[in-house]
Image (spheres, rainbow, N blue to C red):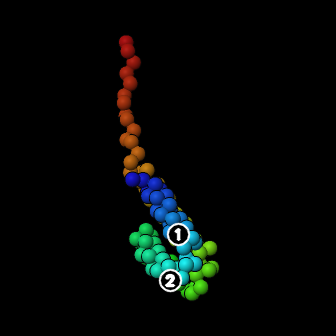
Amino acid sequence: MQPMTKWKLKMAFSVIIDGVDLLFGLIPGVGHAGEFIGIFFAMILWGWRGGIYGLEMLDVTNVADGFIPTASLIGWSKKADYEARQLQWHARNRPASSSTTFTLAE
């Protein structure tokens, strides 16, 4: 799978995580449980940077953090890494140029 395709899929899951946080984060009890689940999935998707998602737990009211797409922002911060990997992928998978020799018919 190409690196940018992988990044796009991860971004789609990040948008889903942020959307669920926006829709269900204000329900008492569900908000903080959702933050723990969000941290888990963000770390699976983005590695150690996904732990930054835990900053959403600083908002004990769960009002403001629903409007900040933290998982998506973490994904955008990784885009340059995936673009560099994409260039390397293209360099490795470039078809070898055929060195066909043409001769003139006599």
Q: Residue 3: x percent and y percent?
A: 44, 57
Q: Residue 40: x percent and y percent?
A: 42, 75
Residue at 50% x, 61% y is: 12
For residue 67, which quarter of the picture? bottom right
For residue 36, which quarter of the picture? bottom left
Dot 1 surroundings within 10 Å: few (below 14), some, or many (20 or more)? some
Q: Which residue is mark 2?
A: 29
**On screen, 8 above or below 35?**
above
- Can residue 74 be seen at all in this image of the molecule? no
Q: Which residue is mark 1?
A: 20
Q: Residue 102: x percent and y percent?
A: 38, 24
Q: Residue 73: x percent and y percent?
A: 56, 70
- Can residue 23 be seen at all in this image of the molecule? yes
SS at badge 2: loop
Alpha carbons under labels 1 and 2: distance apart: 14 Å
Dot 2 surroundings within 10 Å: few (below 14), some, or many (20 or more)? few
Residue at 52% x, 69% y is: 20
Amino acid type indicated by mark 2: Gly
Q: How many marks?
A: 2
> Along the horizontal axis of the image, is 1 left or right of 58?
left
Q: Of callouts 1 and 2, which one flags the residue occurring earlier in the amino acid sequence?
A: 1
Amino acid type indicated by mark 1: Val
SS at badge 1: helix
